[in-house]
Image: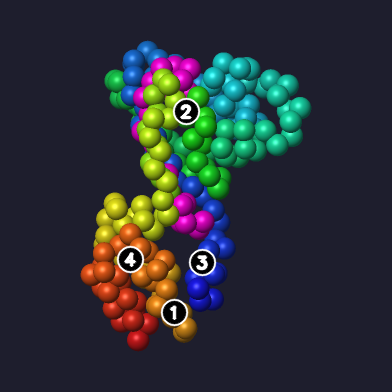
Amino acid sequence: MDSCQKMINKMANNCWNYVSFNGDSKVLRLIKSKFDKYDQCNYFQEFGNYILGLNEVGDETWKADENQHYYGYGTKWWDFDIDMLEDSMTITGDSAWSPPIHLIEQICIKYNVIAEMEYEEGGMDFAGTVTMDGTGIISNEEMTYHEYRYKDDVSSWMDNLSFNFEGCDEVELDDIPTDHPYAKKEHIDELIKLIKKMNS
């Protein structure tokens, strides 16, 4: 890994999340009403507990374990937007470092709803897709961020990876096929040509 890539890997680590809930419209509206009180909670653990009916907003008796308010539900905070339809609700936005998978799973179990979740974190190079229902997680596919981008859109994957090498004096290309074994050889070759052209 060259010096430019190392610098990129030290960037802020926000995890992008996409969660689609499906279920009874009354139940989804109840969940949304609880999400709407996020800004009134001081800690993510307090927020998660409130959604699950374990405490009220402002009740911090759970703080006996000092680490819970950071990672009890998978993250420290979640800056989200909500799009509400009749029988579905979509929540998107950045969380700190890791996705709130545990919270989403517990919501599905408590309220008997279905959730499809996708998350990606480029700085630490991880991503995944998770499907949950009233029994908990029913499928969970973890992968690297770059593999996620590749599966979603090869052109976007190339643009993203080539950007990592832009302006670098010392470009190490020999590791690319090994670092991205999921990619077809033709796409690896095209990526290397793009990087060489960009840095010529």
How far apart in space, not on screen, are marks 1 and 2 (Cα)?
41 Å
Say whether disc 1 or disc 2 marks the residue closer to the N-terminus. 2
- Nearer the camera: disc 4 or disc 1: 1
The circle drawn on residue 139 is none
In the orientation shown, which residue stands out farthest toward the bottom? Answer: 200
Mark 3 residue element: helix
How far apart in space, not on screen, are marks 4 and 1 (Cα)?
17 Å
Residue 95 position in % (x across, y down): 52, 43
Kind of residue sitting beneath label 2: Glu
Kind of residue sitting beneath label 1: Glu
**Residue tagged by mark 1?**
172
153 shown above or below 29: below
**Residue tagged by mark 3?**
8
Say whether disc 3 or disc 1 marks the residue closer to the N-terminus. 3
Kind of residue sitting beneath label 4: Asp
How far apart in space, not on screen, are marks 4 and 3 (Cα)?
15 Å
- Nearer the camera: disc 3 or disc 1: 1
Picture residue at 29% right of the left edge, 20% below the top:
86
**Residue tagged by mark 4?**
159
Asked whether the beta carbons under mark 2 and mark 3 sit within 8 Å of each other, the answer is: no
Give the magenta part as a residue range: 107-126
| Residue 100 seen in the figure | yes
Residue 105 on the magenta segment:
no
Name which quarter of the figure residue 45 lies in: top right
- Nearer the camera: disc 2 or disc 3: 2
